Image: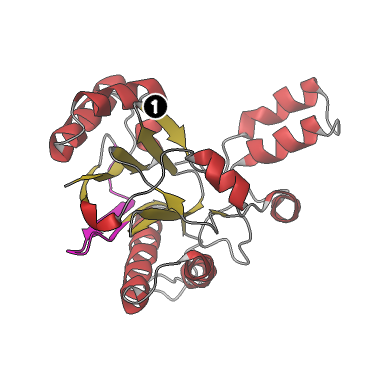
Amino acid sequence: MNNYLEDNRENAATEITQQLTEEESTQLLRGLEYPNGLEYMVSGSLSTVVGTRKNQQDSCYVSVEPDGSALGIVCDGMGGLEGGEMASRTALQTFVEDFEAVRYGQKDYYNFFCEEVIKIDEIVAGLTNAQGETMSAGTTLVAVSVVDGYMQFISVGDSKIYVLRNGQLRTMNREHNYYLILDEQYRRGEITQGDYLREGARGEALISYLGMGNISIMDANPIPIPLIDGDIIILCSDGLYKSLSEEQIAAIIRKNPINLEKTLQELQEEARVSSPTAQDNTSIVLLSYRRK
């Protein structure tokens, strides 16, 4: 995972905060009319590998309830060996514990997701080491809930959420990096192409992550998105999508959409082969929605 960007953070926060509108949410997953959720089942699986790194800074989680509701999370830590591990683990544990406290009797998690990101951002920003010193650690977070055949998501950082629908891979969120600022400035005519290319050297540096303090850039959908038969939701750290193209990811999942464990093994193996000497921590969560 890339180092975060301190410069231009305040400008980015005011310019690029995104909460998806109803129209945008619908466009993301335009599909068939959603039938009775009781006719469908959700299955989930996860996989995480260290790669060629010396330590594991990713944390991931998946749970599926008998009623067909589900939660998947991937966090990718940053900030040194101990700091990255603690940041991702703390973010995941806090999110899961708080989600379980409100899980039953609630179907719309948009407000909860947004408030939880703000809460965890403050918690991670306050992490200290054994000497009581602030760790300056951070983590990405992507989370997806499925309830009654509808999905909601929240994302911070550069981890990804995809949905494979009818064989086509759809990206649900943006990478919160410096390219967001550069793209917007270039679109407005505020910088030249030369400026863009020069600044692009640090384009992948994060401008939003849990632990930065006063976080305001996040992607979330206020209108739950209906799932259809055969949809597969993919949450992953950058170790996957920087090793494999979106078409490679889609092709692997299309080959075996039923056996999620086998699909995960193949995704991890192909990522390893593609980056044999410099494979990042790679974490993947798969959620499958299909007719019983």
Q: Nearer the viewer, residue 46 or 127?
A: 46
Q: Taking 211 as reference, is 217 left or right?
A: right
Rate crowding at label 1 as few (under 14), some (14 to 19) or many (20 or more) other CA atoms within 10 Å.
Answer: some
Measured as percent of width and height from the top left, residue 66 is found at 17, 64
Q: Taking 149 as reference, is 268 left or right?
A: left
Q: Which residues are the magenta region?
A: 53-71
Q: Taking 179 as reference, is 193 left or right?
A: right
Residue 175 visible in rendering: no
Q: Is residue 90 magenta?
A: no
Residue 33 occupies quadrant:
top left
Residue 262 occupies quadrant:
top left
Q: Is residue 60 magenta?
A: yes
Measured as percent of width and height from the top left, residue 146 is found at 34, 57
Label 1 element class: strand
Q: Nearer the viewer, residue 269 or 33?
A: 33
Residue 28 visible in rendering: yes
Instruction: Say which quadrant the N terminus sits in.
Output: top left
Q: Is residue 23 above or below residue 109?
A: above
The residue lying at 78 percent from left, 21 percent from top is 193
The residue lying at 65 percent from left, 51 percent from top is 6
Residue 27 occupies quadrant:
top right
Report which residue position mark 1 lands on.
168
The residue lying at 40 percent from left, 70 percent from top is 129
Q: Which residue of the protein is positioned furthest toward the right in this rendering?
A: 190
Q: Taking 162 as reference, is 230 left or right?
A: left
Q: Is residue 83 above or below residue 159?
A: below
Amino acid beneath label 1: Gln
Q: Nearer the viewer, residue 138 or 94?
A: 94
Measured as percent of width and height from the top left, residue 54 is found at 27, 43
Measured as percent of width and height from the top left, residue 214 is found at 63, 67
